[in-house]
């Protein structure tokens, strides 16, 4: 088997929610590099346009669109824009999330409006975006959905961790429902990422980082590029047989043995 063909995404159309963010932009570039046309969908449409400009400057095919993933109407518009531009959707990366602007409360005293604000984006968002792309993916004979989890799912990670743990449940359930349509649903759970949001959630000089280094058998943290191999595996022919999995990319921090 030709190794290049295994990971080739030529002719595929990928939608990346939160595609203007730190990880989303790196994911979009990797998908473009593998040959896909990429739709960068973000609440911050100006930042999405800037990301598209930097991709098209380098010869990739990319389009920006506004989306608020917590709105069914907006998710449907995102899907319609992708279909208008490239005739269909093969890959959805549910990457948008509230990660840094989290409510300053524990769960036991959290105002319900704050709970809803995070759950609506981090959990309802991936569900609504999945629903929005299904018809097109099914018409094209199948596809790939990758959910952006976090190591925070598998520890007491507050409201953020709760939404990411639930996203693991959504991944398993959607994989079970959609497998027969040729749609594989998987998730990537990164550990500490060396990017702006990663440093906001755990500052570089936090003493907790040193304590973590002692706990994590491999690398304590990694750049967004360390996630690209897993992303392309899950999006390509190489990942045909992988379904319903959450793959941790975290140096061995979370080992669910
Ligand atoms: N950075 C890390 O350390 C880290 C670690 C583990 C997991 N993750 C996960 O990776 C993903 C990306 O993280 P990042 O580091 O790129 O964060 P980021 O904050 O840079 O990017 C998030 C993007 O989502 C967009 N967004 C927020 N709300 C939205 C909405 N309602 N609709 C559409 N877009 C919206 C933002 O505009 C932003 O561009 C998230 O799911 C995050 O939970 C990140």
Image: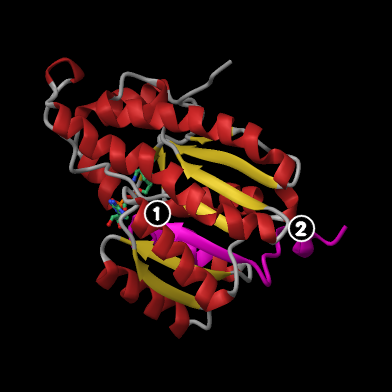
Q: Give the quarter of the image for residue 214.
A: top left
Q: Residue at x 51, y 76 (%)?
A: 84
Comes first in the chain, label 1 or label 2:
2
> In this figure, which residue is indicated by the disc labeled 2?
6
Residue 172 appears at what percent x and percent y? 57, 30
Q: In this rendering, would 235 be left or right of 49? A: right
Q: Is residue 77 above or below residue 181?
A: below
| Quarter occupied by the N terminus | bottom right
Q: In this rendering, would 12 be left or right of 52? A: right
Q: Is residue 43 above or below residue 105?
A: below
Q: Can residue 42 be seen in the rendering of this structure? A: yes
The mark tally for this picture is 2
Q: Is residue 168 magenta?
A: no
The colour scheme used to paint the residues is secondary structure
Residue 37 appears at what percent x and percent y? 56, 72
Span of residues in magenta: 1-30
């Amino acid at each position: 088997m030709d190794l290049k063909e295994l990971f080739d995404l030529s002719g595929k159309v990928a939608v990346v929610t939160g595609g203007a963010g730190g990880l989303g932009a790196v994911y979009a570039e990797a998908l473009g590099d593998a040959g896909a046309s990429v739709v960068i969908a973000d609440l911050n449409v100006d930042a999405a346009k800037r990301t598209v400009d930097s991709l098209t400057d380098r010869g990739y095919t990319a389009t920006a669109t506004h989306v608020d993933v917590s709105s069914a109407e907006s998710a449907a518009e995102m899907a319609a824009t992708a279909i208008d531009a490239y005739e269909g959707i093969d890959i959805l990366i549910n990457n948008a999330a509230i990660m840094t602007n989290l409510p300053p409360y524990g769960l036991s005293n959290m105002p319900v409006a704050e709970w809803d604000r995070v759950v609506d984006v981090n959990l309802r968002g991936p569900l609504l975006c999945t629903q929005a792309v299904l018809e097109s993916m099914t018409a094209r004979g199948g596809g790939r959905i990758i959910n952006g989890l976090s190591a925070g799912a598998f520890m007491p990670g507050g409201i953020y961790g709760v939404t990411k743990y639930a996203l693991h449940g959504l991944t398993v359930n959607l994989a079970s429902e959609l497998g027969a349509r040729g749609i594989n649903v998987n998730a990537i759970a990164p550990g500490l990422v060396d990017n702006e949001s990663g440093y906001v959630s755990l500052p570089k000089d936090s003493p907790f980082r040193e304590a973590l280094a002692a706990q994590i058998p491999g690398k304590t943290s990694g750049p967004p590029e360390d996630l690209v191999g897993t992303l392309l595996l899950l999006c390509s022919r190489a990942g045909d047989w992988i379904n319903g999995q959450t793959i941790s990319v975290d140096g061995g921090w979370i080992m669910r043995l």
